[in-house]
Image: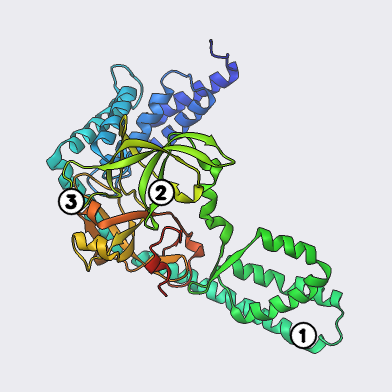
Amino acid sequence: MASPEQNPDTVNEATHHKALAESSFASGDLTSALNHARKALSLSPNTEGVSSMVTAFETITSAASASGDTPEWYKILKVEPFSHFDTVKQQYSKLALVLHPDKNPYVGCEEGFRLVSEAFKVLEDRVRRSEYDAKLRSFEAKEDGDCSSKIITYSRKRKKRVDEVSESLRRVSETREVEAEDEGMMTLAEMQSVLKRNKQKNIIREVKMGRETQEISSGDETLMEMSTNKENGKREAVKKKKKKKTNHKELGEIVEDEDFDFDKERMPRSFKKGQVWAIYDDNVPRCYCLVSEVVSVSPFKVWISWLDYESEKLIFWMKNSSCGRFRVSEKALIEHVKLFSHVVNCERVARELYQVYPRKGSVWAVYSETDTGQKRRKTKHYEIVVCLTMYSDAYGLSVAYLDKVGDSLFKRRDYGCNAVRWVEKEDVAGLLSHQIPAKKLQEDQCGAGVRESWVLDLASVPPDLVSAP
């Protein structure tokens, strides 16, 4: 089927931007060259050489944006730091095909191909990659610990917010004094009018700042309830159903329940053929299965294939693990959706073989460090961690411990080099128990003194941590 003809004016404009990109690159203005090339690509994707030029300029920009003397090889290849070598090799093949100067004699392609080739040479060499990864980890640990500039900025923001809250409290206090004098003389309509004019803005403003003042809410909510129950009862009822709020007083923050409803993500309509799901085993989602067929949504029926743990060096006491390679085994018909926890982010490494390892930013339950070896799994003592790096076959991964501050709310225990725990490759399968679905709060949702916090799915949190104060 022939491609549709493009507007000649659009083609001419794309050619013009391509010429500007070439001119900018020749003059050393890489940012302008990349912008013009992207504009040309968006106008006419079929313009000769534009796609390769955009890839080349992006590669050169990645190399130029390195903070130190050593280029960021992973960034140049457009892969996550510490990615598996198969991922690195696959990405290199794609970029080399687009940038090879013999097949793509366009501006920037030769330099882009040189950078991509050099990055691959470093990462395919075990010794050079080991040295580079060590430097990268050292830099990340230093960056995590050295946050003086962020503290200064955070302090300024906190001071500004404190001043705004103080001003808001002063206005509400003045409003209360006026209302205290006129309360006996006010009609219901007048009371509602005063509330809308003088208080609603202050309350909404404080909610947006992530601050909840118990003294204000107790008085305001009483008055609002008096007026609303009589004149807007139906509207209030609908509003309460749509917006349910959970008050995390430990952080002084109001979080919308609907934003963290994990049950919505495991509804019957969420199931698709080919997905890998975690299934509960002994109250925690430690088993995996592959969805073979969705028979029906209502009533819920799906055919699954169990994924059995497989390892070349299986520890004699560890017959199952949540990390490693899993092979497709026997099928089963499941008719209860509550058996499922969450979709697993995994990698298919062969036709019937899947690989599950922690990803950067994921939250996991780990066995307590007070126990060792087989005793860890028998005692069932757990702690919660967040993964700071992606798992690497060569080096394992780094994690940071979380502490409970609310019913489902957890925060980082500490920061700095000493707060980061490096888990060796050999210890990953034995230490990690299972992944916990979690959502990280935005920076402005965290309360005073808290830099990072997560809302966890209590259905996957170990029972002893759920009941812990």
Determine the residue located farthest toward the left in the rendered image: 127
The quadrant in which residue 188 appears is: bottom right
Please indicate, yes or no, whether residue 291 appears anywhere in the rendered image. yes
As drawn, the label of residue 426 is 3
Q: Quadrant of the C terminus?
A: bottom left
The quadrant in which residue 57 appears is: top left
112 vs 169: above or below: above
Q: How far, Cα to Cα, is label 3 from label 1? A: 69 Å
Q: Position of residue 169 (x, y in %)?
A: 63, 80
Question: On the rendered structure, is 227 left or right of 438?
Answer: right
Which of the two labelled residues, at mark 3 and mark 1, occupies the earlier sequence position?
1
4 vs 433: above or below: above
Tell which tag, 3 or 1, sits nearer the viewer.
Answer: 3
As drawn, the label of residue 178 is 1
Secondary structure category for the residue under label 2: strand
Query: Mark 3 belongs to which amino acid?
Result: Glu
Query: Mark 2 belongs to which amino acid?
Result: Ile
The residue positioned 28% from the left and 26% from the top of the image is 93
